[in-house]
Amino acid sequence: QVQLVESGGGLVQAGGSLRLSCAASGRTFSSYAMGWFRQAPGKEREFVAAISWTGGSTYNVVSVKGRFTISRDNAKNTVYLQMNSLKPEDTAVYYCAARLFPLATMAINEYDYWGQGTQVTVSS
């Protein structure tokens, strides 16, 4: 079992920044990949970013390239999503997810555990 707890969401103006954190517990954090996903009202959950077990490989959806950065600190069992230059269309509930496999993927159905989500609202 893996427990995931997100934090860091909130209300920010367009152009602003937020850093999301996801604290993991229950299994050896450094052995599995992590991802961030988001779900806007009335839309399906979508991939945002993912990172491999060592942090050596990362992936971002095209819409956030150059603005969002995923990272991890295995000593703290935490994965981060630094979000800069936020836009109103980034408004969504953001979820972190764990994949019990070292390599990252964009495929939502490959992730085994999910956090409860944190709301990010970007005002124009």
Image (cartoon, rainbow, N blue to C red):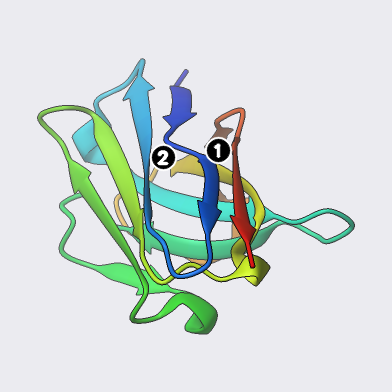
Q: Where's the C terminus, which quadrant?
A: bottom right
In this picture, residue 18 sits left or right of residue 73: right
Q: Is residue 18 above or below residue 43?
A: above
Residue nearest the observer in this picture, 11 or 100: 11
Q: Which of the two labelled residues, at mark 2 and mark 1, occupies the earlier sequence position?
A: 2
**Type of amino acid at the residue the image marks with label 1:** Asp
Q: Give me the C-alpha separation between circle 2 and circle 1.
A: 7 Å
Could you tell me which secondary element the residue under label 2 belongs to? loop
Residue nearest the observer in this picture, 27 or 7: 7
Residue shown at 42%/36% (left/top)?
Answer: 8
In this picture, residue 46 sits left or right of residue 87: right
The local crowd at label 2, few if under 14, some if 14 to 19, many if 20 or more residues have their Cα within 10 Å, is many
Could you tell me which secondary element the residue under label 1 belongs to? loop
Name the residue at the right extreme.
42
The local crowd at label 1, few if under 14, some if 14 to 19, many if 20 or more residues have their Cα within 10 Å, is few
**Type of amino acid at the residue the image marks with label 2:** Leu
Image location (x, y in percent) of residue 57: 23, 68
- Evaluate whether residue 104 shows in this view: no
User: Which residue carries the number 2 mark?
Assistant: 100
Image mark count: 2
Q: Are marks 2 and 1 in contact (CB under 8 Å)?
A: yes
User: Which residue carries the number 1 mark?
Assistant: 112
Residue nearest the observer in this picture, 55 or 101: 55
- Evaluate whether residue 78 shows in this view: yes
